Amino acid sequence: MPNYFPPNSNSFVTWLAWGGGIFALLLIVGLPFYARMNNNRVGVPVEQPVDFQHNLHVTQVGLDCRYCHTTVETSNTASVPPTETCMTCHSQLRVDTPQLQAVVASWESGAPIAWNRVHDMPDYVFFNHSAHVNNGVGCSSCHGRVDQMAGMWKNEPMTMGWCLECHRAPEKFLRPASEVFNMAYSPLADPIAQETLGATLVEAYHIDTDKLIQCSTCHR
Amino acid sequence: MKRTRRSLRLVLAALLGVLLLTACGRNMFDQPRVDAFDASPFFADGSGMRPIPEGTVSRERGALEPAYLTGMGPQGFLTELPIDLDVDVLLRGKERYDIYCAPCHNYNGDGRGMVVQRGFPQPVSFVDTQRLLDAPVGYYYNAITNGFGRMFSYASRVRPEDRWAISAYVKALQLSQNASVSDVPADVLSQLTQTEAAR
């Protein structure tokens, strides 16, 4: 039988094993790091064409989230309000201030304001706002204390692992329906009370905990 | 001969290595489709979402009476609520009123909401103006739907059934804001005095 492989092919296998090991290690360490570096700009304010301040509108004026985000209870998206919503008050208030120039210009021309997206879900993820707010997931659980933010940034990494923290244990994060839009409420504030409350809420909202962790719940 | 073999092996290893990179790319993350609120160069205004053509009737919601949608019948504003009134309707009306109306009209309807305190022209109080106390429920539905004076239309923000619930709540607010202690039923009154005493 002739030698198909030269004698030094044995070392090739060793090199391949070493190289493969190092490459795999680099992938394991580097990929999550790379992914977080690029997609999860948690806490980094996103620049916007209008210097809109959530804290002023929510805390000082007292607007409910739903005054502007009108479809959050009925639709996939919470809705970025049209210029018309801004102009409901600002047709009269602070019309000539430099902060409102872009809003007034949009109102006059009819061209929408090009807001920059803060939360960009991957296209292979199905997400529905109404399914969450109608089943006891509060705004601030994912978006943080928007009522205290001047700019707007992502408050949570929005990675699959982060989603699963709640999908695997919804009882830790659910709130009564009356507290969903209460920015100051936190299910994490009293973990012992939440333990009993959470379990009753899972029942009350008819949440199928098996279904929550199935792939096709989010990837359809 | 030996040299060729070695370079062949190197090329083969490199080719295999390239296979590992095939999953790297964002074309699944950003698929060629327009998401809600995405920009799109396809349309002249640069927006991917299209405005609803005028006169569009929602098939999902079924055919609704013009009176239900406008608050006006052949004899003018509807004086009767076109939906069944119960406490849930009023509670829904209160919730929606507090979200969409209270910023200007205030939680008690006197027209001194926070937006007004910050300089918006004050609307007339509908809890102590006789003309508005006498106005039928359809008048309020119509004002929410079409706007009134400086108030914009809320038709795009509040659904018809919620507009009726708000209108019903406004009528209830007019009653409650002009009620006296003697109007309170005896059993509720004892609760009220207890709460008052507890303070």
Image: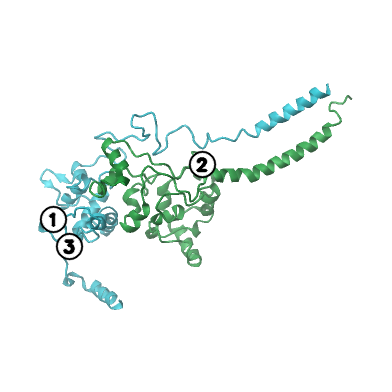
Q: Left or right? Give the position of B78 relative to B114.
A: left
Image coordinates of residue A206 in percent, x first then y, are 45, 55
Residue type, numbered disc 1? Leu
Q: Quadrant of residue B1?
A: top right
Q: Residue at x 88, y 24 (%)?
A: A2
* Alpha carbon separation for disc pair 1 and 3: 12 Å
**Residue pointed to by mark 3:** B175
Q: Residue at x 37, y 39 (%)?
A: A114
Asked if disc 1 and disc 2 are in contact, CB closer than 8 Å, the reply is: no
**Residue pointed to by mark 2:** A219
Secondary structure of residue under mark 2 = loop
Q: Quadrant of residue B97?
A: bottom left
* Alpha carbon separation for disc pair 1 and 2: 53 Å
| Chain letter belonging to callout 3 | B
As drawn, the residue found furthest toward the top would be B1
Give the class, few, some or many, for how many residues have Cα within 10 Å of label 1's Cα (few <14, many ≥20).
some
Image coordinates of residue B53 in percent, x first then y, are 27, 33
The cyan chain is B
Secondary structure of residue under mark 3 = helix
Q: Mark 1 or mark 3: name the one nearer the start of the chain.
A: 1
Image coordinates of residue B31 in percent, x first then y, are 49, 34
